[in-house]
Image (cartoon, rainbow, N blue to C red):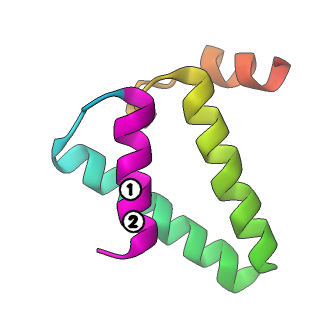
Amino acid sequence: MSDDHAELVNLLKTEVGEVGGERLESWAQAFEDWIEERRARFNPNTAERSHLAWREFLAFTEKAPWEVRIADVEGYVAE
């Protein structure tokens, strides 16, 4: 597990509580893959800003990614 992957798993556990299991690992891996693609295709700063935005979004919603609904995204954007 990469440092980024471990960091995301810990972030999710911190922000949304102990949700554990394979679902959390799958989300963390998908996010890490997405960040790596952005880092490769765009400026590395873009990937870092995306990572920060994700952290802020999770903190705002206080939900696991699979629990997020459109209203949560709209609330975040409005905030």
The answer to whether residue 69 is seen in the rendering is no
Q: In which quadrant of the rendered view does residue 57 lie?
A: top right
Distance from the alpha carbon under mark 1 to that under mark 2: 6 Å
Q: Is 5 in the magenta?
A: yes
- Please state which of the two labelled residues, at mark 1 or mark 2, is closer to the viewer: 2
The answer to whether residue 61 is seen in the rendering is yes
Q: Is residue 47 left or right of residue 28?
A: right
Q: Residues within 10 Å of mark 2 (few under 14, many from 20)?
A: some
Residue type at numbered disc 2: His
Main SS, magenta residues: helix
Kind of element beneath mark 2: helix
Q: Residues within 10 Å of mark 1 (few under 14, many from 20)?
A: many
Q: Is residue 52 above or below residue 57?
A: below
Q: In which quadrant of the rendered view does residue 50 lie?
A: bottom right
Quarter in which the C terminus is drawn: top right
Q: In which quadrant of the rendered view does residue 59 lie?
A: top right
Which x, y percent locates residue 6? 35, 62
In percent of the image, x 80 and y 72: which residue is there?
45
Report which residue position mark 1 lands on.
28
Residue that extends furthest to the left in the rendered view of this protein: 21
Q: Is residue 27 left or right of residue 35?
A: left
Residue that extends furthest to the bottom in the rendered view of this protein: 40
Which x, y percent locates residue 60? 62, 24
Q: Which mark is residue 5?
A: 2
Q: Is residue 50 above or below residue 65?
A: below
Quarter in which the N terminus is drawn: bottom left
- The magenta-colored residue range is 1-16
Kindly indicate whether the residue at mark 2 contacts the one at mark 1 (C-beta within 8 angstroms): yes
Residue type at numbered disc 1: Ala
